[in-house]
Image (cartoon, grey):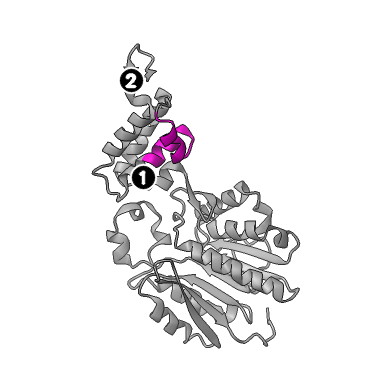
Amino acid sequence: MASTGHGARVASLDAAALLARAASGLATAPTETPRLDAELLVAHAFGRDRTWVHAHPDAVLDPGKAHELAAWVQRRAEGEPIAYIRGFKEWFGIRIAVDRRALIPRPETELLAESAIAEIATRLTADSRAVIAWDVATGSGAVAVALALRFRTALALRRVRLVASDLAPEALELAAENLARHGAASLATLALGDLLEGAGGGEMPAAAARLPRPDVVTANLPYLTTAEVATAPGSIAYEPALALDGGPDGLNVIRRLLSQLPERLAPGGVALLEIGAGQASTVGELAGELGMPAAVTLLPDLAGIPRVARIARLDAGMGDPS
């Protein structure tokens, strides 16, 4: 119970009542998890987690904050993603700041980060050469942050070099903010440009220095079809189309990246591409037509769906011409 400042007693300001009200307000919203969404928003209003809210049903929320919570519930009822309302997404054990400048990190992309970590770690233990990792279309910078935190020491010692690039200046700004929030701003080179543009010393807008050919490429590129983006329910309507729309078959941008690999990927290098359901065979065929010797492995997500295409360049004996 709490006073509104006008002499009235408002029972709805305690946690249990706020939770019930929020859940009721989301009952007909375009969400499959109205109760969970309500819990997340109420917990965010208190600056706590869901467990705390359930353990403190009588906790009182400031009337001004309760008014803000009501606005959040309305935004969620209209379909806006929880992550954009709260301003962050818990992903891979990391809090990633998100807003409409970039795609919200998905659980599926954790496989991409895990695979990249394994690739880099294997190379670090194989010999003393530096490993060049490049996160293409970095968006919020989620994968780049995960790599920076895992290899912080190796990056400081220059055993690993990390490049993160994006075509959208606003997305690259968000990536920079996330790296800075995690104390990793100095550990990555940010580059504004298209895919692997500039790899091997070529020109690239806003590159801090000549960029090397990468040993490990990570890429969560647009892989939804244009039709899927236009009709998909939920958060997709709020996220940048540039990060989602992969063209008529969802593979336009993936094709362009694959076409760059023979020239841009270092000999013996590996490209890790997140792909959509049903795209595995086509991506495998495209990788087989690159004009360079390559082996393709498809890595499944927790649902058993091939989610990451691992394309390993097999001409490791070649000299690097860059």
How packed mark 2 is, by other alpha carbons closer than 10 Å (few <14, some 14-19, many 20 or more), is: few
Residue 257, given in percent of the width and then of the height, sits at 50, 74
Q: In this rendered view, identify the residue nearer to me: 284 or 127.
A: 127
Callout 2, which amino acid?
A: Val
- The reply to whether the magenta stretch includes residue 213 is no
Residue at mark 2 to residue at mark 1: CA–CA distance? 24 Å
Query: Considering only vertical position in the picture, is 82 above or below 318?
Result: above
Is residue 55 magenta-colored?
Answer: yes
Q: Position of residue 113 (x, y in %)?
A: 54, 64
Q: Quadrant of the C terminus?
A: bottom right
Q: How many marks?
A: 2
Q: Main secondary structure of the magenta part?
A: helix
Is 248 situated left or right of 102 in this image?
left
Residue 138's place in the image compared with 196, above or below, is: above
The secondary structure type at the circle numbered 2 is: strand
Determine whether the residue tagged by mark 1 lies in a helix, strand or loop: helix
Q: Which residues are magenta?
A: 39-57
Number of the label disc, if any, that sits on residue 10: 2
**Nearer the N terminus, badge 2 or badge 1?**
2
- Residue that sits furthest to the top in the current view: 7
- Name, please, the residue furthest toward the front: 55
Q: Residue beneath label 1, please?
A: 36
Residue 145, x across and y down, in percent = 59, 56
Asked if residue 194 shows in the view, the reply is: no
Between 311 and 247, the one lying in front of the other is 311
Give the class, few, some or many, for how many residues have Cα within 10 Å of label 1's Cα (few <14, many ≥20).
some
Question: Amino acid under label 1?
Answer: Leu
Q: Position of residue 92 (x, y in %)?
A: 52, 56
